[in-house]
Image (cartoon, grey):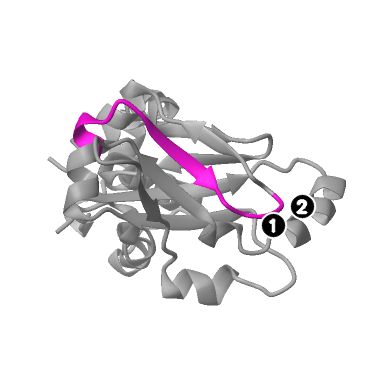
């Protein structure tokens, strides 16, 4: 099971201010390794326990959260993004910066969050693992006529796929969406960072 975060892992606001600069630098460097650009307007950041802790700490700081109940709500939202063994969890961003882009692409890319797959090089042939979307996420963000600009997705790798990824020379992420047929190869550094989460 993934090592989920608890109240004890989230520091109070004064303590967080003291550690924030160093923590933020570490997370920026970590996210740079775990970010993958997929075509011209989509990026994915693969999450782990540290990136999720940072997200919760920053939310608590921005919203000046001081009660356990407030933090518990954030833990409930973000803990599912911590990968367990054989899992990859990612935040998918549509990098749209203007109203015109939003109006053009959000209707075009309905279903994009369900169209991604990880392709792992294996001696027996490529192993393809489709992404999955949490039911609660579907209820909140999936619309029949327009997509959201942020999605949370998960890949549950079977044992053979996880074993293959540990020794793979090539791992790709691909979109099979008919309006966004792009792929990207993960760097060796990215693959190493992702499989390290499982240990």
- Report helix, strand or loop for mark 1: loop
The residue shown at (31%, 31%) is 191
Between 61 and 198, the residue placed more toward the observer is 198
The residue shown at (62%, 54%) is 177
What whole-number distance in Å separates the C-alpha atoms at marks 1 and 2? 6 Å
Q: Do the residues labelled 1 and 2 touch (CB within 8 Å)?
A: yes
Lateral position of residue 49 relative to residue 172, left or right: left
Point out residue 142 in the picture as x, y percentages from the top left corner: 60, 71
Above or below, 136 relative to 33: below
Corner quadrant of residue 58: top left
Above or below, 131 relative to 122: below
Q: In the rendered image, which residue does mark 2 sit on?
A: 105
Residue span colored magenta = 165-179
Point out residue 146 in the picture as x, y percentages from the top left corner: 72, 66
The residue shown at (77%, 52%) is 105
Identify the disc placed on residue 109: 1
Lateral position of residue 124 relative to residue 184, left or right: left
Lateral position of residue 79 relative to residue 32, left or right: left
Point out residue 108 in the picture as x, y percentages from the top left corner: 76, 58
Above or below, 29 relative to 112: above
The quadrant in which the N terminus is found is: bottom left
The quadrant in which the C terminus is found is: top left
Between 7 and 132, the residue placed more toward the observer is 132
| Magenta stretch: includes residue 178 | yes
Between 20 and 82, the residue placed more toward the observer is 82
- Report helix, strand or loop for mark 2: helix
């Amino acid at each position: 099971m993934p090592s989920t975060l608890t109240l004890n892992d989230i520091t109070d606001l004064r303590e967080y201010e003291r550690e924030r600069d160093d923590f933020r630098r570490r997370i920026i460097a970590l996210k740079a390794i775990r970010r993958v650009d997929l075509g011209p307007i989509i990026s994915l950041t693969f999450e782990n326990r540290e990136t999720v802790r940072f997200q919760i700490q920053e939310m608590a700081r921005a919203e000046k959260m001081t009660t356990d109940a407030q933090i518990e709500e954030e833990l409930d939202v973000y803990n599912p993004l911590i990968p367990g063994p054989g899992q990859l969890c990612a935040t998918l961003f549509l990098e749209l910066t203007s109203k015109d882009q939003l109006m053009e692409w959000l209707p075009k890319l309905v279903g994009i969050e369900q169209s991604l797959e990880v392709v792992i090089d294996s001696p027996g042939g490529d192993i393809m693992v489709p992404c999955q979307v949490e039911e609660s996420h579907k209820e909140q963000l999936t619309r029949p006529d327009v997509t959201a600009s942020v999605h949370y997705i998960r890949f549950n790798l079977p044992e053979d796929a996880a074993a293959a990824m540990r020794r793979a020379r090539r791992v790709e992420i691909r979109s099979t969406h008919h309006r966004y047929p792009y792929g990207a190869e993960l760097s060796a550094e990215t693959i190493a960072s992702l499989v390290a989460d499982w240990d």
